[in-house]
């Protein structure tokens, strides 16, 4: 996992946007996985501002609350639509978002979602945020590290964090559907963004601790092409910061071996 530390959250968003923009430009038929949540908002704002051509890009949503309408202002669907999808020229036929109120069996709907990812050629890039408890998507502590898209219960800590988006505690969803760790790790590249001091201990566990279901983000240590973009506050608990900086500088100097400078073959 490549660790890159920027000065602040704004710089993280700009760096992330530069990486994603490079991929979209090099591969105009790329397949992107989109995370909701607060952390990617700056990235999406910057991508929209750049007026890139998204007409051939395919997107898949990372997760969604169960039993929440897509037009609910706290839904993941609403978030990614408002902050990116409706602001770029995506083809509606190339937009695939998880449904928290599926028509039929939810497990079957999740399996169909994974088949759609496979039919699109797989994810070229999965964008992730990081939960304070270490979750990625809605893969909570104790999850399977090999599961594909699936329904899951939400932890008490996640529901507490999500509480401001709902009128009362009783309305905070108790379950969600999410790409599983197996689905995420199958992406060719993963870009995780984490900012703020509240994420520092979790970042350290994910990067420098053991690979464990207790910290689902630690599974990214197994990915051959993952980047974690952090601000200085989120990186504060890392013990080997100088080593990460040296590795990032070395990869940058090599140019052609930089993770998003490798050309991706366009799909027909």
Image (tube, grey):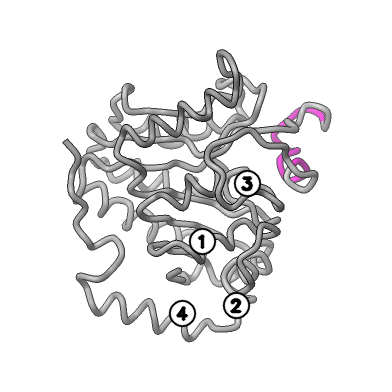
Secondary structure state at the residue bearing disc 4 = helix
Neighbor class of circle 4 (other Cα within 10 Å; few <14, some 14-19, many 20+) is some
Residue visible at 42% across and 48% down in the picture: 126
Task: Return the residue at label 4.
Answer: 244
- Crowdedness near tag 1: few (<14), some (14–19) or many (≥20) residues, C-alpha within 10 Å: many
Q: Are marks 4 and 2 in contact (CB under 8 Å)?
A: yes
Q: Does residue 41 show up magenta in the picture?
A: no
User: How far apart are labels 1 and 3 at the CA level?
Assistant: 13 Å
Are circles 2 and 1 on residues that touch, CB within 8 Å?
Answer: no
- What residue is disc 2 on? 238
Q: Residues within 10 Å of mark 3 (few under 14, many from 20)?
A: many
Q: Which mark is residue 139?
A: 3
First along the sequence among labels 4 and 3: 3
Say which label, 4 or 2, has the lower sequence index.
2
- How far, Cα to Cα, is label 3 from label 2? 23 Å
- Establish if 229 lies above or below 268: below
Q: Nearer the viewer, mark 4 or mark 1?
A: 1
State the residue in front, 235 or 225: 225
The alpha-carbon separation of the residues under discs 4 and 3 comes to 26 Å
Residue 267: image tag: none
Provide the residue designation for mark 1: 220
Picture coordinates of residue 98, whole percent (x, y): 51, 28
């Amino acid at each position: 996992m490549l660790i890159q530390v920027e000065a602040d959250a704004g710089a993280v968003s700009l760096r992330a946007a530069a990486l994603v923009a490079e991929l979209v430009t090099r591969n105009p038929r790329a397949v992107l996985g989109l995370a909701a949540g607060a952390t990617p908002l700056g990235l999406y704002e910057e991508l929209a501002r750049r007026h890139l051509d998204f007409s051939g890009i395919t997107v898949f949503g990372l997760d969604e609350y169960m039993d929440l309408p897509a037009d609910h202002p706290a839904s993941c669907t609403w978030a990614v639509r408002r902050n990116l999808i409706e602001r770029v020229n995506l083809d509606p036929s190339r937009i695939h978002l998880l449904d928290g109120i599926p028509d039929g069996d939810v497990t079957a709907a999740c399996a169909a979602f994974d088949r759609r990812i496979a039919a699109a050629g797989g994810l070229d890039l999965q964008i992730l945020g990081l939960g304070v408890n270490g979750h990625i998507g809605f893969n909570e502590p104790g999850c399977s590290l090999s599961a594909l898209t699936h329904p899951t219960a939400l932890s008490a800590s996640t529901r507490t964090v999500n509480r401001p988006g709902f009128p009362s505690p009783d309305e905070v969803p108790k379950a969600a559907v999410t790409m599983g760790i197996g689905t995420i790790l199958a992406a060719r590249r993963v870009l995780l963004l984490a900012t703020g001091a509240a994420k520092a201990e979790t970042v350290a566990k994910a990067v420098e601790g053991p690979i464990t279901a207790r910290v689902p983000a630690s599974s990214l240590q197994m990915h051959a092409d993952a980047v974690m973009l952090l601000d200085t506050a989120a990186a504060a608990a890392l013990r080997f910061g100088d080593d990460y900086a040296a590795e990032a500088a070395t990869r940058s100097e090599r140019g052609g071996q930089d993770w998003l400078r490798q050309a991706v073959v366009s799909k027909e």
